[in-house]
Image: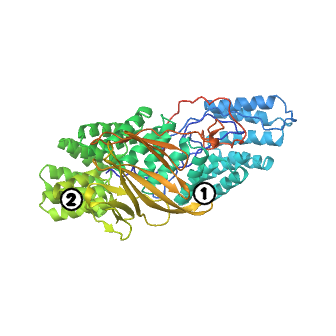
Amino acid sequence: MLKRHENMRQVLARCVLTASGRRADTRSGHALLGRLIPTRPNPARSLSHRTGAVAALVLAAVMHAATAPASAAPDAAAPGMARKGGAALVRGDTGQAITHYTTALADTSLANDRRATILNDRAVAYARLGKTKEAFDDFNAAVQLFPEYAALYNNRGNLLLALGLVKEAAKDFDRALTLAPGYAAAYNNRAGARIRSGDADGAIDDYTHAIRLLPSSAAPLSGRGLVHLEQGRPHAAIRDFSRAVGSDASFAAGYRNRAEAKLAVGHYEEAIEDLSRAIAFDIKNGDIYRMRGRAYLVTGDADAAVKDFSQAIELKPDDTTIYAERGLAHGRAGNQEEALADLGHAIERDPRSAMAFAYRAYIFKEQGQADVGMKDIDRAVKLAPDNPEVLWAKAEVAEALGQRDQAVADLRRVLFLEPGMKLAADALERLEGDASQVDDRPIAGLGQAGWEVVARGKRYFAVNPAYRRLSVPLETVGEGLPKILTWESRQAPLRHISVLTFSGGTIKGAKGPEPTEFAAILDTASNTVIAIEPHRQGDKQSTWTWSDDKVTIASIDGVTDEFTLMARGQTPVAAAPRRRREASDAYGEDPWADPWAAPRPASRRSAARPQRRKPKTLFDLLFN
């Protein structure tokens, strides 16, 4: 039930559709796949087609900086009309923008490069109206006039990617990067293409390159976070999403995605806080209410879960699975009649809903009719034999029928398939007194200092008999098995804080293969993994600074993370990461206002920081 929100939905990058390279005011996010010109970076479809959400960003002032040589003197009407077209595009008056651009293009004295930039802008406007042929015609004409203009290839690549022509889109992004090797937005967009083609490692490389160029930009951080989440690295995802929301405090999708990652690692209260922040910025998104309802349900607040599921149903009345989830919440709140009504409605609307049958079986069990519930379990198992929710409900019914061994076996299977499912862990602990022992497969030669590396499916964990309730996910990024390297406990007043370092695999570096290491910050008093930080890559190593109540980590990718360490017995909470400005950040401009940004020359420096604009959100597009 608490597995990540069905289907990751796309992570197309973000970069602006501007003609001449001057910024269109920006915030962070992803471009929505299947939509041509989204406003915030876009979640690109993940390899398993699960949806994760990412919000959107406001496309702000699409202004033109003249690119004609100083000796050229085009008629004053053309730049004036082009500026009016840009202003209309920002207002959302796309038809008027096309009219102004067309008038500007009627000036026969325009230099080729200037004409190409206006064609580029008009192509953007056509794309927004869904006029794909006209957009391609303008992009192609512009390329003929100004083949050295990297933004044209980037923009055309985004249009190709939106149409599902992934290979052709990648070629255009490659051309853009050949012309402008420091073009961060093109790296971001090419990462989206690589995700679409199933190259998660390549996407990580491109997002990481973009982050090095612009370490404070939320778009590549969000994109990389979604890939980490899809690849089973929720702690790495939390780190990237935390940086993203630190860069853009109103980034609703960043909070929503970080909540999804926190649910995966069992940080339920923190996930609820993040989802509440996301709702504050996007109050009409049913999926965020739904996810918060799930979090409330596993923390035992069934009444709050019912309220959130009801709000989600109001916003998404055609989604029958929400009725099933509200039915379970009603049942756990003691509202049996309401529960059966919701579950009956879900089954009537979708007779193949394994979840609805499983949850109804649980409600029958709660009513003392476990034998009736077993009939629904049989249907659910036929529909989805390895579904964790189905197996959890099957275990609950089996326990009620006195089949304890079967219940334990089913719960162990659930925790093998979905290690973070709290309902199953709670049930197993009730039956056996210890939910820490699942079907682990020890890997010889990888442990030390009392720690052992075990495999659970395709994932690896570090376990220690001295900390039976603490299981450390060994998130790796390259080739090779994780190996425990060091284990160190802090001194008072942080005796409950320890650091476990492990090898993270070997990845491709600029000078060849580079070994990586990660460091897990652990609270052994509360059995909590606070964070997992990249510690070393090749000859680069992070720097750690400890105080009595926090640790500050200058990371290998140029960004500083800071974690507040609470008093013993409390769960530490990561503070918003601080960022240090890099030389690559000197432009004073953010190229992530759209998926269509032009590169900036390295010598340009803005006189003042651009004014931030309040972003819109696009959750309704992401989930409908």
**Residue 377 drawn above or below residue 12:** below
Provide residue 238's location: percent of width, then percent of height. 43, 47
Residue furthest to the right in view is: 71
How is this picture coloured? rainbow
| Amino acid, disc 2 | Ala
Relative height, residue 190 to residue 59 (above, below): below
Q: Marks 1 and 2: CB-CB under 8 Å?
A: no
Type of amino acid under label 1? Val
Instruction: Say which quadrant the C terminus sits in.
Output: top left
10 Å neighbourhood of mark 1: few (<14), some, or many (≥20)?
A: many
The residue identified by callout 2 is 395
209 horizontally vs 51: left or right: right
Residue 447: percent from left, percent from top:
36, 65
The numbered mark at residue 166 is 1
Numbered label attached to residue 575: none
Residue 421 location, x and y as percent? 30, 53
Q: Please tell me how crowded label 2 is: few (under 14), some (14-19), or many (20+) other residues with Cα within 10 Å.
A: many
Q: Of residues 540 and 615, which is closer to you in this image? A: 540
Q: Nearer the viewer, residue 507 or 568?
A: 568
Question: Closer to the camera, 401 or 536?
Answer: 536
Identify the residue at image location x=32%, y=53%.
420
Q: Secondary structure at mark 2?
A: helix
On the question of residue 115 being in view, the answer is yes
Residue sitting at 71 percent across and 49 percent down? 180
Vertical relation: 246 (above or below) 187? above
Outermost residue, front side: 491
Specify which label sits upstream in the sequence, 1 or 2.
1
Viewer-side residue, 37 vs 606 = 606
Residue 53 in view (yes/no): no
Q: Tell me residue 562's x, y (percent).
A: 44, 41
Compute the Cα span from label 1 to label 2: 44 Å
Disc 1, SS:
helix
